[in-house]
Image: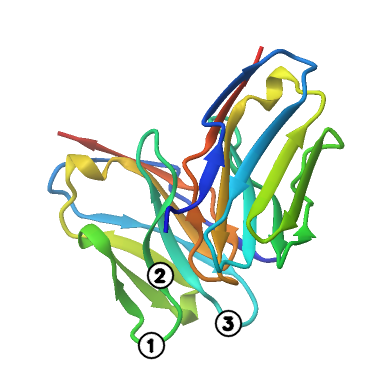
Amino acid sequence: DAGVIQSPRHEVTEMGQEVTLRCKPISGHNSLFWYRQTMMRGLELLIYFNNNVPIDDSGMPEDRFSAKMPNASFSTLKIQPSEPRDSAVYFCASSYSTDTQYFGPGTRLTVL
Amino acid sequence: AQSVSQHNHHVILSEAASLELGCNYSYGGTVNLFWYVQYPGQHLQLLLKYFSGDPLVKGIKGFEAEFIKSKFSFNLRKPSVQWSDTAEYFCAVKIIFGSGTRLSIRP
């Protein structure tokens, strides 16, 4: 298996633009997680899905952030409009239930 | 409330020193316990995990952790650290992560 795949790996955009991050989980995994990591705030859980259904989105910062999982092999995290404070590394991870989470390589987002 | 506490935010050791990183949790029910490691510039990866059985768990690269139910702890240990162990270490209970401990090793 190729592991968790995230795209793009790097994204530089200007304030106010829409940003879409993509994730392909490991086949057979039924849970998917989106995290944000910064030096200041550390690792934060934004949202997680179980069987494609959002279970807990309490970590989503505000209405500018939205996440979808239309099927078991694809998820998106969208920021609209983006702001400089959204600059961070965004990780996607997948697991089978509450077993080991496998993390993707991350997307480094810079909002100018 | 369910939580995981890692009280050491930054630990600095010399090579060959022994390591113990603390992890305490508050969680009702069955616990699945994990230690993840994040090397500089990389993503998190599993170091070791405990679900049941022998409370002393051995992981990769010489790391081990001990589950002590009475103390709600799952501390990570390594008898002799190397410079390559420089990383951030995260304890987790199921899907709840601690805030991480940054480990710096002086060569």
By what rule are the colours in the image chosen?
Answer: rainbow
- To the question of a shared chain for discs 1 and 2, the answer is yes
Instruction: Give the image location of residue B50, x and y in percent.
Output: 42, 75
Q: Earlier in the sequence, mark 2 or mark 3?
A: 3
- To the question of a shared chain for discs 2 and 3, the answer is yes
Instruction: Give the image location of residue A74, x and y in percent.
Output: 66, 52
| Residue B68 in sight in this render | yes
Q: Residue at left 48%, top 66%?
A: A100
Q: Residue at left 14%, top 33%?
A: B107
Left or right of A73 in this view: B106: left
- Which quadrant of the view contains residue B106? top left
Q: Which residue is mark 1?
A: B53
Instruction: Give the image location of residue A9, x and y in percent.
Output: 51, 31
| Residue B14 in sight in this render | no
- Residue B30's disc is 3
- To the question of a shared chain for discs 1 and 3, the answer is yes
Pointer 1 local density, CA inside 10 Å: few below 14, some 14–19, many at least 20: few
- Which quadrant of the view contains residue A12? top right
Q: Which residue is mark 2?
A: B49
Left or right of B9 in this view: A48: right
SS at mark 2 in the image: strand
Vertically, is A93 above or below A78? below
- Which quadrant of the view contains residue B12? top left
Depth order, front residue of A80/B82: A80
Vertically, is B96 above or below A10? below
Q: Chain of mark 1?
A: B
SS at mark 1 in the image: loop
Amino acid type assigned to the residue bearing label 1 in the image: Gly
